[in-house]
Image (cartoon, rainbow, N blue to C red):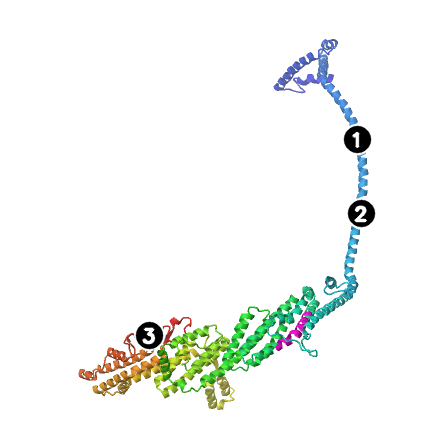
Amino acid sequence: MAGGGRRLVQWEVSATPLAPLTSLQRDLIFDLADIYSHYQDSSERKTSDTIEPASLKKSTDIDVESTQQFLQWYDELECGASKGDDSLYLDYYKQLEERKNECGILLQQVDAALQNFNKLSDEYNLVSTKTNALHVASAQLIADQSKHFNISTEIKNKMHFFSQVENLSQRLNSPTLSVSSESFFTILSKIDECMTYLKENSNYKESNVYLIKYRHCLSRAFNLIRSYVNHVLTHATEQILTPRPQLDADSTQIELLPLNPTADTAFALFFGKFQAAAPKLKNIFKEIEDRVEKSEEYANLLQECQQCYLTQRAQVIWSGVEAAVKELTDNHKGDHCTLMRSACSFLMHISQDEWDLFYQFFSQSSPLLTSYLGGLCNTLYDTLRPYVIHINHLETLAELCTILKIEMLEEHVNSNPEPLAAFGRVAAQLLQDSQERLAYRAHVCLRSDVLNYKPAAGDLAYPEKLLMMEQIALSLQEQPLKRSDSHNSMVSVGSVTSQEVANINSEGSRQRLSVSSSPADLHGMWYPGVRRTLATLSRLYRCLERPVFQGLSQEALVLCVTSVANAAQQISSKKTVIDGELFQIKHLLILREQIAPFQVDFTVKETTLDFSKVKTAALGLIQKRNQLFSMNSNNALLEFLLDGTPMVREHLLDSRKEVDRRLKSSCESFIKHSTEILILPLVKFLENAQKMANDGNTARVSPEQIAAILLETQRLIKANLSPLQRSMQLYLTNKETEFILFRPIRNNVVGNYIQIEQILNNGSYSPDDMIIASCPTAEQVSVLLSSASLLTGNEPVMPYSSNKRKISTVKSTSNAVPVSSADPNKDNNKSFII
């Protein structure tokens, strides 16, 4: 402490102070001193009662003689004050020391507990380690046990597929096993399962050996199924084929299949027994069908069962069908159409019933059924085909084609295609045979009845026949007919042909030419060649295929046109040229209108060889004989081979255009002859005048001669115009057609008069000469023609026109005779073209 005092003294030594203080620090020290003094005073007051007076006196009554003593005193005083101030803290410190000691003791106890706990932890870790090791060992044992169990189970499962063969074999050999029982199908499923497994695991050592054993078991099961199926079906067959009790004891004849297969007795006899057996076999066949896709053996078994079934059905039904078809042929020997319809209906019912009965046993279709039904229906084909190929009548053949095509194929087979597929093929074969026979007979008939037809006297009795029919029609009218409404009351060719068009498009079973309600049957008045041609085409239209019909129709039209032309020549030779030409025009118009409804192309392609170049090449070869074997490019033989090859050419023959061409030619010929009948002197005069003009001859014909020619011409017009128009009325029977055909005749007459008038006006003739010639004007000629006509004032007046011929097209009424190839459904737009 003395050393400390000395150091305190040196704090503020001016020379070398130990701790020099700043003014601020000094102020702070003084402030601390004041605070301390204040604090000391308060402490003294608080501890005055506890401080002994002697000690206080001792502490205060000290003589200070030196600085050292003062400092010592001060130090003691300071220590005493500190102790006085720290008494509370000291007590608290003592308490803390006690608590520290207690905590030390407690810490010692905790350390001892921790040591115990650490010991327990070590012991626990030791036990846990041993327990985990035991658990791991146990888990490994359990895994090994599970592994060995799985291996054992897998081996057992695999061995199951090998060990079942003996059990299954014994069960299959059991005499009490029934094929229809559920256990039998269980055995089949087990065999299938085992065989499938062995096939999938063919690498196993004994797989092939046991697979053979299972195949043997499956074969044994199949044999049981075959035996059972054959037994059930054979028993049903025997019940049907057993001789009826009403037959003699020695007779083995079976009852024939009735003609009505849908009758109750027939159905019960030939189908009832098998229907009764169907439930016994349905489940068996269903199980087999379900396994068909799994194994080929089941497919073969199903096919054998189906074959067995169809064999038994053939034994039951075949002879009955043959006998029934034969009985039908005997009952309808002369009626081929009824025979065809009855036999086809019978086979359709049989096919449908057989189809339904088959699917009462089986669920899947089979080609064997189609083959069986095809063989059954071939009986129909074998029976009816000899009748078909010997039929000569076109009507019968056409009706047979209609029955087969419409009634059988379209109405029945197309609406029920699957059951009647086999019947449809047979019906199609019969239809083809009928169509082939029909086409052949049509060709023969067209040749014999159209081209080579020798017309009788009545066939060429024109116009007598037309006059007779007109008188018959007029006699039935209550009042006399006027010319103006004759086309409405009389039966015209157009109306008749329109009805024939309707007949061709109708659904009637027979295609025959129709007539109107009038007894004047103008269709009956047609030339037989035309009537037969159109009747043949109308029969063939719905019966033959389009290409075949087109070829026949083209040939028929060519033959018909030729026949009409030959008949027209004979009429012209016996009667007049006008009668022959009007006859030809009339029938060509009829023919053209009648072929319009046929929606086919009458164009046929023909291939011919053109040998025109062969002649030229041969001549060149002869001329170049010296160059036959020339080695240069002018080798004559090589040129002959290259240039002399016949050319193949194709020609399109359109029979419609041929009819149009013949019609146009006939109309032009009729117009020419009619013009000559009316104004022949005038025509000859003009021809001579033209010839003289061409030769340069200027000689003039006297006016008197011209007047005589004109007078003779007028006489001919007055004498011949009325009969000419009367002939046109008889043949054409249509006002507008007559008008169209007469117009160019009238134009020719007026044109020739105009030429005469031009000759008179060319300056060679004086006015007096023209008066002497008295050439009428065009208007006067028109009046002359109108006055000489049979037509009444209701007919329109013909306008003046030049001599140039024109192609005129006039819309016809419903009674007009259309000759264009217009749509038959648009009758109002038909036109007549000259």
Amino acid tagged 1: Asp
Which residue position is annotated with label 1?
Answer: 111
Residue 138's tag is 2
Amino acid tagged 2: Ser
Mark 2 → mark 3, Cα distance in angstroms: 127 Å
Please state if 50 lies on the left or on the right of 494 as rendered. right
Vertical side of 6 occupied by 360: above or below: below
Residue 773's tag is none
> Is any part of residue 652 visible from this angle?
no
Mark 2 → mark 1, Cα distance in angstroms: 39 Å
- The boundaries of the magenta stretch are 304-323
Which residue position is annotated with label 3?
Answer: 485
User: Camera-side residue: 724 or 509?
Assistant: 509
Q: Residue 395: x percent and y percent?
A: 49, 79
Q: Do the residues labelled 1 and 3 touch (CB within 8 Å)?
A: no
Amino acid tagged 3: Asp
Asked where in the image residue 670 lies, by quadrant, the reply is bottom left
Please state if 6 lies on the left or on the right of 638 as rendered. right
| Mark 2 or mark 3: whose residue is earlier in sequence | 2
Using a 10 Å C-alpha cutoff, classify the residue at mark 1 as few (fewer than 14 neighbours), some (14 to 19) or many (20 or more).
few
> Is any part of residue 457 visible from this angle?
yes
Q: Residue 759: x percent and y percent?
A: 23, 83
Picture quarter with the N terminus:
top right
Mark 2, mark 1: which one is toward the viewer?
2
| Mark 1 or mark 3: whose residue is earlier in sequence | 1
